[in-house]
Amino acid sequence: MPKRSAEKIVIDASADFYSFYARRRGTGGERTGSILVGSIDCKGIPMIKSELTVKTGRRGKGQKAQKKKMATVATVFTQEPYIRTPEEVVQSLFPAGEVQSKSRHKTSGPQRKRVWASLQASKDWFISDVKEEMDRRDPRGRKSRVVVTDGERALQRRACMMINDAVLVLDLLHVLEKLWAAGHSLHGEGTDEAVEFVRQRAFRILRGEVSQVVKGLRQIVTKRKLKGKKAEVLLGAAAYYYRNKSRMRYNEYLAQGLPIASGSVEGACKNLIKDRMERSGMRWSSDGAEAMVKMRAVYLSGDFEEYWDWHIAQDQERLYPKTRWEPAATVVLK
């Protein structure tokens, strides 16, 4: 099959993506968990040169060649409450000894998980689509709504404004990344001291003591009179935590059984984008990438057969619209 024909088939096949999901209502009578989770992230797709920004004469210091365009990725699913303690979370993150004690609770995992992404839609429109998906699943607002994001300010602001009935949670894994950077800066990579540094502060953060951790990081810089890169890393982590502390009430989230990490959307970034769109030598046009991501999202969400029936019906309607036949007006000759 010629390349252009294959591209056109995929683009045509994805034409009814949004109308397919917009027509859905509720869960079809299926009982689902009491927590409704949305998670949003971004992932780059390698593009052909003509789709990238206009080249400048010379790149600035530290500026990299632009080879990718960012797609916004989302997941929405329901789950049962998964109540844990800070001690249990720390034990799962930093297992000690040969035999790990099993958690007292067992999670049932995500239910009716939908994943999707868009390269062309604006972030505002895309987040509003996430909000609509959550409303379709919970039209009466009976479920506890949670949105898990990373620390990107623009994404957080939009989510806060547009999904204002949800609890906004900062992904714990992004929190730990900052701690590991600080620990490695002070004690070196692979050292027991770095692991203990991170473990102690992670435990305090999970107990809701974010302000104390921020204060401690700043005091380390002051008392040790750190300069340069070390001071930059520690003060950067402190500023990050201070800015996001309203979204880091992990002690409350754990007690309510809410999710505190965005593993679902990180997995979507890998399965939806990376595994298909970033293979060796691949470069995409904007329309081709958008269509491929839509079709892959339908497949990964488990809706392919149902979507294909819907697409065929809609295609038939476009080709052969059901118009009402009326007799021609009678012409009276004078």
Image (cartoon, rainbow, N blue to C red):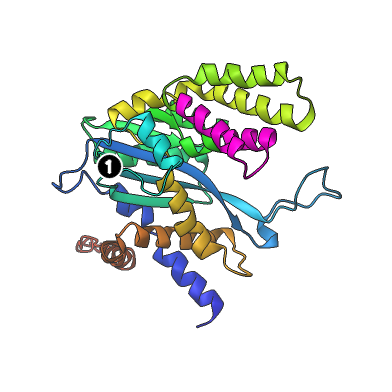
Residue at left offset 40%, top offset 49%: 98
Residue at left offset 29%, top offset 27%: 256
Percent of width and height locating residue 146: 35, 33
Query: Eyeballing the image, is 118 above or below 299?
Result: above
Looking at the rendered structure, the kind of residue marked 1 is Thr
Give whichever of 70, 53 is nearer the camera.
Answer: 70
Query: Which residue carries the number 1 mark?
Result: 78
Query: Eyeballing the image, is 218 above or below 148?
Result: above
Give whichever of 267, 176 is nearer the camera.
Answer: 176
- Report the residue that reaches farthest toward the left: 29
Which residues, given as a range, are shown in magenta?
178-205
Residue at left offset 20%, top offset 61%: 326
Locate the C terminus by quadrant. bottom left
Judged left or right of residue 329, residue 97 is right
Percent of width and height locating residue 32: 20, 43
Which secondary structure type mostly characterizes the magenta part of the structure? helix
Q: Is residue 305 visible?
A: yes
